[in-house]
């Protein structure tokens, strides 16, 4: 998976160490209130979304590989890596997914380190899974922290679904800035269940979370179930659809990932002004 580097534009604004200035006035008031939007921070917050979603998928792929292989026998993992260490103590399972110093996933990303999952038996079709990243890197970005997954074998649509609470931090490879995300999300596996291959899988994602950068920048995001983020792995590196309601720097807006077309663009709208984000 290629690194996602975001560039903001009204026509084209490049994500650099500058701030975007929105100026507005009302009626005959000669005062001109100014609002600064940090382009660099906005880009890093958006970039972190892609990293968080991709690494979370790796967590669940590790679980599926051991516990639900029939649903996806041909996974994103190759034959040489990762390794799986399963320890059982009564009804308690510890699963260590070890990617070693470097592991190229079939879906594209290069990862290293370990993901440790712990879980017990299913109760009423649900299983609670705790997970943590250990010395884990995704395309050169270090990912730390973890969370808890409530895994549902079949939701009311007959699809696997996960409810997640997470506290995860990414240290970007090209920046000294870190991004921390705390929140809850629902991930529904809506297409490709049991097809025998990972290339037709499609996931819907919704929930709410807060992303805080080490610069002090804070962005809250809300995705409604009626307009979920859409992610498919095959042949596309990007979130391809869905709308995120965002609040940052005392401003409200939206981040629109499109209509399902696999392209490298999304639209950020702040104060009624649209900015094109290039995801390459």
Image (tube, rainbow, N blue to C red):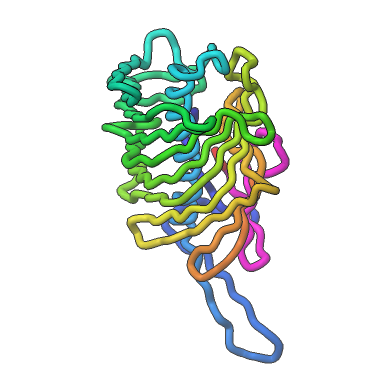
Indicate the position of residue 140 as horizontal and vertical percent values. Answer: 35, 32
> Which residue corresponds to the image point at 56% horizontal and 52% vertical from the top-left?
8
The single residue placed furthest to the top in the displayed view is 79
Which is more toward the observer, 76 or 263?
Answer: 76
Would you place residue 271 above or below residue 124 in this image? below
Region in magenta: 258-278
Q: Position of residue 164 (x, y in %)?
A: 47, 42
Q: Is residue 224 left or right of residue 94?
A: right
Magenta span includes 117 = no
Q: Say if 235 sits above or below 33 in the image.
A: above
Which residue corresponds to the image point at 42% horizontal and 27% vertical from the top-left? 121
Main secondary structure found in the magenta portion: strand
Q: Position of residue 151 (x, y in %)?
A: 50, 33
Q: Is residue 164 visible to the viewer in this orientation of the structure? A: yes
269 in the magenta segment: yes
Q: Is residue 12 visible?
A: no
- Identify which residue is drawn at 66% across, 58% down: 274
Which residue occupies 56% across, 38% down?
Answer: 187
From the viewer's perspective, tell me whether residue 249 is left or right of residue 170: right
Q: Which of 44/145 is in front?
A: 145
Q: Disc count in the image? A: 0
Quadrant position of the C terminus in the picture: top right
Pick the front one: 23 or 109:
109
Query: Horizontally, is 131 left or right of 77 in the view?
Result: left
The image quarter in which residue 251 lies: bottom right
């Amino acid at each position: 998976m290629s690194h996602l580097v975001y560039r903001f534009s009204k026509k084209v604004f490049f994500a650099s160490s500058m701030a975007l200035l929105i100026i507005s006035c009302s009626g005959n008031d000669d005062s001109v209130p100014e609002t600064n939007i940090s382009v660099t921070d906005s880009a890093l917050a958006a970039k972190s979304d892609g990293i968080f979603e991709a690494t979370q998928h790796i967590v669940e792929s590790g679980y599926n590989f051991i516990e639900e292989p029939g649903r996806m026998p041909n996974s994103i993992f190759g034959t040489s890596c990762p390794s799986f260490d399963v320890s059982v103590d009564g009804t308690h399972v510890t699963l260590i997914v070890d990617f070693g110093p470097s592991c190229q996933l079939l879906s594209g990303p290069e990862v290293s380190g370990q993901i440790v999952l712990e879980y017990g038996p299913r109760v009423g079709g649900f299983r609670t899974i705790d997970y943590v990243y250990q010395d884990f890197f995704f395309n050169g970005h270090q990912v730390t922290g973890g969370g808890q997954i409530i895994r549902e074998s079949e939701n009311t649509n007959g699809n696997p679904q996960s409810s997640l609470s997470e506290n995860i931090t990414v240290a970007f490879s090209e920046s000294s800035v870190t991004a921390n995300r705390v929140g809850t999300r629902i991930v529904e596996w809506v297409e490709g269940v049991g097809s025998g291959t990972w290339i037709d899988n499609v996931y819907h994602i919704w929930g709410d979370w807060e992303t805080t950068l080490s610069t002090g920048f804070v962005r809250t995001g809300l995705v409604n179930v009626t307009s979920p983020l859409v992610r498919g792995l095959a042949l596309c590196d990007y979130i391809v659809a869905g709308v995120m309601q965002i609040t940052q720097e005392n401003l409200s807006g939206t981040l629109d990932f499109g209509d399902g077309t696999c392209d490298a663009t999304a639209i950020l709208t702040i104060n009624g002004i649209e900015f094109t984000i290039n995801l390459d």
